[in-house]
Image: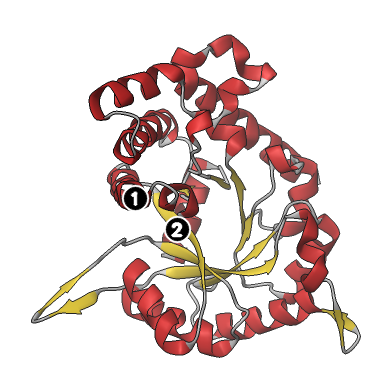
Amino acid sequence: MINKLVEKIRKTNAPVVAGLDPMLSYVPGYIKEKAFSELGETLEGAAEAIWQFNKGIVDAIYDLIPAVKPQIAMYEQFGIPGLMVYKNTIDYCREKGLIVIGDIKRGDIGSTSAAYATGHLGKVQVGSRKYSAFDEDFATVNPYFGTDGVKPFIDVCKEEKKGIFILVKTSNPSSGEFQDRIVEGRPLYEWVGEKVAQWGEEFMGDSYSYVGAVVGATYPEMGKTLREIMPKIFILVPGYGAQGGKGADLVPFFNPDGLGAIVNSSRGIIAAYKQEKYASFGERNYADASRQAVKDMIADINGALNSR
């Protein structure tokens, strides 16, 4: 799957992933009104509104980018109806030819991690048959449990030719409370990056490992260091746009060949119509605003990469 991701980035010339992290407050009023009129102000009504909103976004941007990243918590908050929309969104995106990165941030003791890996990336045995449950192409993984928590994901990825992105240095403001702690003379995130590079050597694609890393755009200097520590690791970079990251900050995350990283924007894309820059599109044309935001993001990143 990492080879396919690299190929699609090359084809689209867009190292961009759209974060499908919907909140009801992002959904235009006319979509919510229709969903509530049919299903009431219920979990089912909320899930339907999210589903229609997602489809509009995906229809508008699928030809511009290689991948999407639905964040499962934004669906889980609506219970079982929300999880059904999460699955429907995965299937719809894959029908459109998009690679799906399930932002699930799982990681636990071995047997539990194995169940998470099976549910999201593998196949579960039911009697004499096997089924794919959520069936994402990649998943995000929390490494706090160490090898016990990560290896089950790698094992499933080897079976299914899928991939993972392991949290190394996250984009949130308080990430440094633990991740920046000095351990034997080095920050903890460097130790994690070194371990990710070791895990990655076990499962290589043509140029990059099926084991990737998450490193926030808000810390470009740390990104430069981690790029050197993990030369064959593909980096998923959150924090662009709404969290403050911009194209110029992203250059250190990429290798000289212009590959090696894919940059996520969530609110900046899916709620673009709420920004002053795209307000002229209006609520009814929210998806067109998202398409323009994607085009602007691609131009910003490629402009920065081409001028280095």
Instruction: State which quarter of the image contains the N terminus.
Output: bottom left
Instruction: Give the class, few, some or many, for how many residues have Cα within 10 Å of label 2's Cα (few <14, many ≥20).
Output: many
Q: Position of residue 285 (x, y in %)?
A: 46, 15
Outermost residue toward the right? 185
The Cα atoms of the two marked residues, 1 and 2, are separated by 8 Å
- Residue at the spot 48% in from the left edge and 41% down from the top edge: 65
Task: State whether residue 157 appears in this view.
Answer: yes
Quarter-wise, where is residue 278 in the image? top right
Q: What residue type is disc 1 on?
A: Ile
**Local SS, label 1:** helix
Q: Position of residue 143 (x, y in %)?
A: 60, 78
Q: Is residue 99 left or right of residue 299?
A: left
Q: Is residue 269 left or right of residue 127?
A: right
Q: Are marks 1 and 2 in contact (CB under 8 Å)?
A: yes
Q: In this picture, is 132 found above or below 124? A: above
Q: Position of residue 154 (x, y in %)?
A: 45, 81
Mark toward the start of the polypeptide (1 vs 2): 1
Q: What residue type is disc 2 on?
A: Gly
Quarter-wise, where is residue 231 in the image? bottom right
Q: Position of residue 145 (x, y in %)?
A: 59, 84
Instruction: Give the class, few, some or many, for how many residues have Cα within 10 Å of label 1's Cα (few <14, many ≥20).
Output: many
Q: In this picture, is 235 found above or below 273? A: below
Q: Which mark is residue 63?
A: none
- Residue at the spot 57% in from the left edge and 84% down from the top edge: 199
Frontmost residue, 297 versus 217 = 217
Residue position marked by numbered label 2 in the rendering:
102
Q: Is the image coloured rainbow, by chain, by secondary structure, or in one colour?
A: secondary structure
Task: State whether residue 208 appears in this view.
Answer: no
Frontmost residue, 203 versus 89 = 89
Residue position marked by numbered label 1 in the rendering:
90
